[in-house]
Image (cartoon, rainbow, N blue to C red):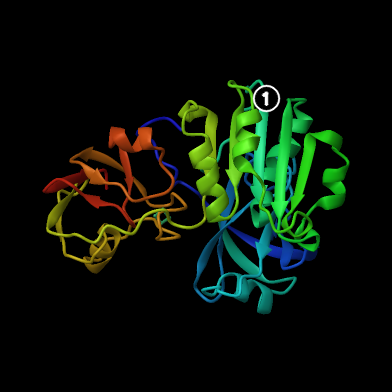
């Protein structure tokens, strides 16, 4: 993404849930089609959409179908027993035919198609964006390999399809390996220095991947997270100046910028409110943000060009935002 542009311009579309299909134990695929039979907004592998659920929640899910498909979005939803209302609502209340609003697509996990070789690492439901990526790499005749781990074989989605890719695909089932998890460090160590590496999976897998890739060029390492990496900035006492109107808003302790703006009747785009989707990304014109999001790379954060106002605070007394 170019510096000082934002990811937040994702349009809303009215779509119908056209099908729910079993993918693996605890994972179903939900297929959404435009209500008017039109084409979907084009997307690239790695993108996610925002589902605006009828219970008022907005949840982000990775697109798992091929970017060549123009008639539908397909997402995988894992039934999470600790669900805060997203996956449990999807499983218990969403039925085929339900009409809802869909935001996006938005891409925080871009595929570099020009890479000499691509190493994809997926754990559990993390296969969803990775599957879209490998379909793209395959259709573009690029060099790639997949390492996909689940706890049990029944939790492995797309198993039959993946088997068709032969020795490009390496499957790991913890229960068939005496409980041992995939050795991410070994996968990374075996990758050529010029390879691009991608990982989407549970937190321990992402931590291993981050550690193993530390010495590689940052532009070769790509991670997708759906849980926050850092706590929301809670220290207030600074002022946000809105450049377009000249209004100044003081941020109190325990308040996010987004909450403070809302309290003043000022609307700003938002979705996840956890720093993981990019919907609230805002250009910074002056001041030093205290970045807490999981989207911007450390290099992007260091430029202080943009920030996520749902979770990040300020290290300076005044922040001037392009709002
Ligand atoms: S609303 Fe999702 S990153 Fe801020």
Q: Which residue is mark 1?
A: 117
Q: Residue furthest bottom?
A: 92
Residue 31 in the image: x percent, y percent?
73, 59
Is 233 situated above or below 94? above
Q: Is residue 131 visible?
A: no
**Residue at x 59% of width, y 43% of height:** 199
Q: How many marks?
A: 1
- Tell me: residue 16, above or below residue 291: below
Which residue is most to the front?
A: 178
Q: Is residue 204 above or below residue 300?
A: below
Q: Residue at x 80, y 64 (%)?
A: 21
Compared to residue 80, the image places residue 43 above or below, namely above
Residue at the image point whose x is 51% and y is 74% from the top: 84
Image quarter for residue 147?
top right
Residue drawn at x 69%, y 58% is 76
Element class at badge 1: loop
């Amino acid at each position: 993404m170019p510096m000082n542009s934002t990811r937040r311009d994702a349009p809303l579309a009215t779509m119908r849930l056209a099908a729910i299909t079993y993918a693996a134990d605890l994972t179903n695929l939900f297929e959404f089609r435009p209500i008017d039979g039109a084409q979907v907004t084009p997307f690239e592998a790695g993108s996610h959409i925002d589902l605006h659920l009828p219970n008022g929640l907005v949840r982000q899910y990775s697109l798992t179908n091929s970017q060549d498909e123009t008639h539908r979005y397909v997402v995988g939803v894992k039934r999470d027993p600790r669900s805060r209302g997203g996956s449990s609502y999807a499983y218990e209340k969403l039925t085929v035919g339900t009409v809802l609003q869909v935001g996006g697509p938005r891409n925080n996990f871009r595929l570099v198609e020009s890479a000499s070789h691509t190493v994809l690492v997926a754990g559990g439901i993390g296969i969803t964006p990775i599957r879209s990526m490998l379909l793209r790499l395959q259709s573009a005749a690029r060099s790639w390999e997949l390492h996909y781990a689940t706890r049990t074989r029944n939790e492995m989605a797309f198993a039959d399809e993946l088997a068709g890719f032969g020795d490009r695909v390496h499957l790991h089932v913890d229960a068939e390996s005496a409980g041992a998890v995939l050795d991410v460090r070994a996968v990374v160590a075996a990758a050529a220095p010029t390879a691009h590496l991608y990982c989407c999976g549970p937190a321990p897998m992402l931590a291993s991947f981050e550690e193993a890739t530390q010495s590689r060029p940052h532009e070769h390492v790509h991670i997708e997270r759906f849980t926050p990496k850092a706590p929301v900035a809670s220290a207030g006492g600074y002022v946000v100046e809105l450049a377009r109107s000249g209004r100044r808003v003081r941020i109190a302790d325990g308040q996010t910028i987004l909450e403070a703006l809302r309290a003043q009747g000022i609307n700003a785009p938002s979705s996840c409110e956890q720093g993981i989707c990019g919907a609230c990304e805002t250009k910074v014109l002056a001041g030093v943000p205290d970045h807490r999001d999981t989207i911007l790379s450390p290099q992007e954060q260091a430029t202080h060009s943009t920030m996520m106002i749902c979770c990040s605070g300020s290290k300076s007394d005044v922040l001037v935002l392009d709002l």
